[in-house]
Image: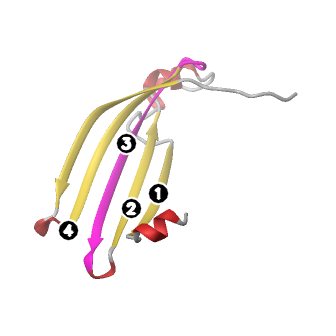
Amino acid sequence: RSGRRTQSLDVSMVEDVDGRGPGGGSHAASRNYSQFNVDQELQTFYKEISYWEEIEDQNQVVGKIRVAAFLPKYIKGLDAGNSAQDYDENSAVAVYDYKILMKSISESEAASI
């Protein structure tokens, strides 16, 4: 069977904390999101933690991002054979780590992309 499948998501940022390091060359942020999948009628939560540092002498920015996904407590109660009391809604069900490297390019390099 072929065809195109689409999904609808409703995402809301529920908390945002940002900070700059001494001298302004680094930045850290923590953001919490609530996500609702309309098709599955499933609400999930995730937290994003990011850290960025400017390397001036190399015209680069390096960074790390960690995203952790969480399920609400009622999901475990719906899972047959498991007790909701055994479920810790503060434990991530998935964790994703990313490393980022951004390099400054000239206008002519950008135009050739």
- Of the residues under marks 2 and 4, which one precedes in the sequence? 4
What residue span does the magenta drawing correspond to? 38-56
- Disc 3/disc 4 C-alpha distance (Å): 24 Å
- Disc 1/disc 3 C-alpha distance (Å): 12 Å
* SS label for mark 3: strand
- Disc 2/disc 4 C-alpha distance (Å): 15 Å
Q: Residue 65 got which mark?
A: none
- Of the residues under marks 4 and 1, which one precedes in the sequence? 4
Asked if the residues shown at circle 2 and circle 4 are in contact, with their CB atoms under 8 angstroms apart, the answer is no
**Depth-wise, is mark 4 or mark 1 nearer the camera?**
4
* SS label for mark 4: loop
Q: Amino acid at mark 1?
A: Asp
Q: Which residue is mark 2?
A: 64
Mark 3 Cα shell of 10 Å, populated few (<14), some (14-19), many (≥20): many
Q: Which residue is mark 3?
A: 47
Q: Which residue is mark 1?
A: 97
Q: Residue at x 43, y 48 (%)?
A: 67
Give the residue at the far right of this rendering: 1
Q: Residue 25 got which mark?
A: 4
Q: Amino acid at mark 3?
A: Lys
